[in-house]
Image (cartoon, rainbow, N blue to C red):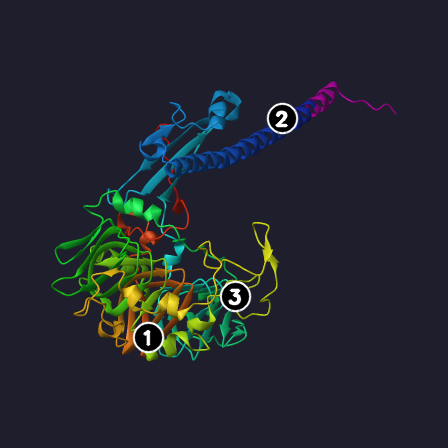
Amino acid sequence: MNLHVSPLSRRSLSGNTLVMVVVIGGVMTLTIASTLALSSASLRSAHGRADWNAAFFHAENALQWAAQGISDSSPASVSNFYSTADGTLSLPYMAAARADANSGFRNAWVRVVSTNASLPNVYLVEASARVGDKVRTIQAVVSKSPPSQIFDYEYFLNNWGWWWGNSITGNGGNRANWDFDFRSNPTVNGLILANGNITASGVPVNQLAQNPPFSGQAGNDPVDLAHMGVPRLPMPNLKDLSYYETKALADATTNGLWVGGTQVVAGVHKDVAQPGLYLVGTDSQPIVISNTVVVEGDVVIQGKMTGHGTLYVGGNLYISGNLTYKNGPDWSTPPETMTTAQRDQWVINNQNKDLIGLAVRGSILGGDVTSSDWKSWCFDSAAWGLSTVGDETHLGADGIANTGDDNIPFLHADGTYSTGYDADGDGVIEGNFNYDTQLNMTSARAAKIAGYPAASDGSPVPYNTVASNYMNLLDAIFYTNHAAAMRLAAANAVFHGVLVSRNEAIVFDSSCVFNYDSRVHSRYNNDPNRFVDLGLPVAGTLRLDKFAELPPDSSNL
């Protein structure tokens, strides 16, 4: 049998095969094209991500360049706008990248703005960079010689913090550079931070397994608000007051101290015979402190104060009675218990109210230090008195007195090996406090204080005639890297401001309340114009605050 295939059928089969080849080819072409397109898109996306990251890197470097210029007092702190396009942003690697067409780097700029003439050390710095078609813009507040971060807390102890008593209330953050001990359930409305442990009667607290030894906001949320093992914050060093004296003498007409309308100090009080100063303020004749003022000796002070500024004391600060603001803020609702928006508004409302810092090279001593009541409570007490603290000659590696490693030599950062440790950072390894030579107001000490009341024979009157333990009200930002010891015998003591010290022996009656002054830490706000610059002690040369990324600003790029 002959099998016959017609030409028409053969042609049809060939045509179908051709169509199939064309279709398959087309599908392959589309597939290859899609794959190539997808690969190209992925490559572009990868390049875009790399450019996006690189733009941020360059903007950040520009901002850091400007910050360094501010620190060095170079033209970057004086002029306003710097750019790689005109060579004023002089980072060598940027110039090289801009000259290399393959780098993708187009340009970068940075703008430095001093937004408030009354805050000459605070700058708003904005930087922007372009790589390829990607632009990143960032901003930060840069502060030159900023106040130490220890002032961000109402109560800061460079040694062992202790709150013993259910009648203690703190409205604000608290921090210790070692352990922080609590007894009898005090109230803490704010942070608790300890470089060592948070303890209950000396026993470390397990926040996940036991009730906290404090109440208030921190007691209700100890996991969020109470933290152990946080970094130590360095204390300012007031051994040499020359930096602050230079500031004070820069303009003695605005940097000074008055009592009523009489100027007592123009910038710095220097007197070899009487380096100290006796100050009493009243409602009609308040103590006026403006900007930075230095008194090289002891200061005895009480009464009403007014103004904005910080008084640096080269000796001890003796607070001989209540010390309060004449025109202080309204504390009826403590600002640290408010919402963020309410606290911001409180800062704005009270920017021009009295705010004064008292920074002391020696110790801060409240009450009549010559009385047996003061000495027995603040100095002699075996549990907390100054008679058993202050010795830096055998602290051991942790720097805490009376712990198991005392008298054990250890290696210091400078390569020396001993049991001594300069815990207060003043450059001297000291022994325990000595009541007679360091604290007591003797007639010899009083004779070196200008304005101190004198008897008819010209000798200084006894200190108990000008000072009293019957006190309980203190308004100020108090700082010392030695001791803060006070006998507050009038009931219900109240602190408005900040208390910073290395050792603390404050003994009160009935109750004690600490209200943090939120104006001191007004840096929490993004607006530099809200900052209140008191010229407080510094512990570093530069700080970047409120770092943020802004919408891309492609102008000048």
- Is 194 left or right of 258, judged from the image as shown? right
Residue 443 part of the magenta segment: no
Alpha-carbon span between mark 2 and mark 1: 92 Å
Q: Earlier in the sequence, mark 1 or mark 3?
A: 3
Residue 400 shows which numbered tag?
Answer: 3
Under mark 1, the amino acid is Arg
Going 59% across and 66% down the picture, which residue do you hit? 407
| Quadrant occupied by the C terminus | top left
Residue 404 shows which numbered tag?
Answer: none
Alpha-carbon span between mark 2 and mark 3: 78 Å
Examine the rendering and report whether any part of residue 215 can be seen.
Answer: no
- Is 542 left or right of 122, judged from the image as shown? right
Q: Which residues are magenta?
A: 1-17
Going 52% across and 68% down the picture, which residue do you hit? 401
Under mark 3, the amino acid is Ile
Q: Earlier in the sequence, mark 2 or mark 1?
A: 2
Q: Which residue is mark 2?
A: 29
- Point out residue 509 in the picture as x, y percentages from the top left corner: 32, 80
Residue 487 shows which numbered tag?
Answer: 1
